[in-house]
Image: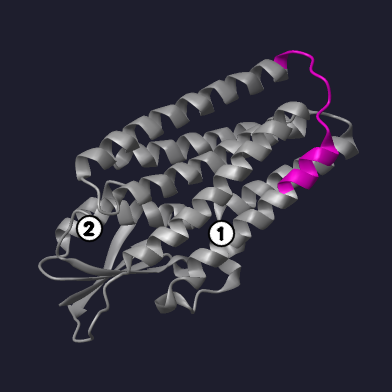
Amino acid sequence: MQKTIFKIIKMDCPSEEQLIRMKLQKFDEIKSLEFDIANRKLTVHHIAESQPILSALETLNLDTTLISTEENTIEIEADTSSMQRKLLWTVLIINFLFFGLEMLFGIFSNSMGLVADSLDMLADSIVYALALFAVGGTIARKNNIAKFAGYFQILLAVIGFVEVVRRFIGVEKMPDFQTMIVVSVLALIANVICLYLLQKGKSKEAHMQASMIFTSNDVIINSGVILAGLLVNWLNSGYPDLIIGAIVFVIVARGAYRILQLAK
């Protein structure tokens, strides 16, 4: 049994973890995966060579390097699929519910920041749904779903970005900053709960620190929308909302690109 440690610079939240799990599922020689998101490290327990695993990880464009490979004599317990399914279903439901909530209130409050954040929630939902389909499923089915999800997400991001540009050029009514802040705070709490559940379910990663939560993209985005809501009120301008919306749409498109990498 080999123990190989990879440094993955851009692995900063559970979404990247699920992308990696799906990418490596086709390797029968992999016996266990241990994620240390706080330190951007992945430990793989496997047989055979590590180079094919590294090559697969590099296709995700997460800036991966191989740190070390050594013989491992410790007995590794296999991952329990039932536990993974329960966790994935939980975070999937939470993310999808808040996708609908933020989209609804984003439209009613005229906030592009909330609409964009809702698409980020949808992106996470897609990743978790893909992971669920991948468990026990065929590679071909996973690739087809990944392609559809990736292109659909890119389409939504482009439509959203065009709407942001239109609002920059035209004259739009001010977004409701109170709704922006309240809904974003609730979404922030939901993301923290998801991250807590994902980490709580991994006994081998009990050392993960709570500070990891505050470095995740989702929490940063939620905080950005909250800040935009405050600036809308203080500056009496809708531009902060449009700026954060544009940034989040770019992040959503970037996430869609990563999903499409899974189909290659």
Indicate the quadrant where residue 3 lies: bottom left
Q: Secondary structure at mark 1?
A: helix
Image coordinates of residue 120 in percent, x first then y, are: 55, 41
The question of residue 207 being in magenta is answered with no
**Res. 54 mark:** 2
Residue projecting furthest to the top: 170
Query: How much space separates mark 2 and mark 1, taking CA atoms?
Result: 28 Å
Indicate the quadrant where residue 42 lies: bottom left
Q: Which amino acid, by three-letter code, is at mark 1?
A: Cys
Image coordinates of residue 31 in percent, x first then y, are: 21, 70
Left or right relative to 8: residue 31: left
Image coordinates of residue 67 in percent, x first then y, are: 28, 70
In the foreground, 193 or 110: 193
- Asked if disc 2 and disc 1 are in contact, CB closer than 8 Å, the reply is no
Task: Determine the residue positioned at 56% across, 47% down.
Answer: 95
**Quadrant of the frame with the N terminus:** bottom left
Q: Which amino acid, by three-letter code, is at mark 2?
A: Leu
The range drawn in magenta is 169-184
Number of numbered discs on residues:
2
Residue 108, compared with residue 131, is above or below; it is: above
Task: Determine the residue positioned at 79% across, 14% down.
Answer: 171
Residue 51, compared with residue 22, is above or below; it is: below
- Residue that badge 1 annotates: 194
Q: Secondary structure at mark 2?
A: helix
Left or right relative to 88: residue 216: right
Please, which colouring scheme is shown? one colour
In the foreground, 117 or 194: 194
Image coordinates of residue 243 in percent, x first then y, are: 68, 33
Q: Which badge, 2 or 1, comes first in the chain's sequence?
A: 2
Left or right relative to 16: residue 99: right
Task: Determine the residue positioned at 27% across, 51% down.
Answer: 23
Can residue 227 be seen at all in this image of the molecule?
no
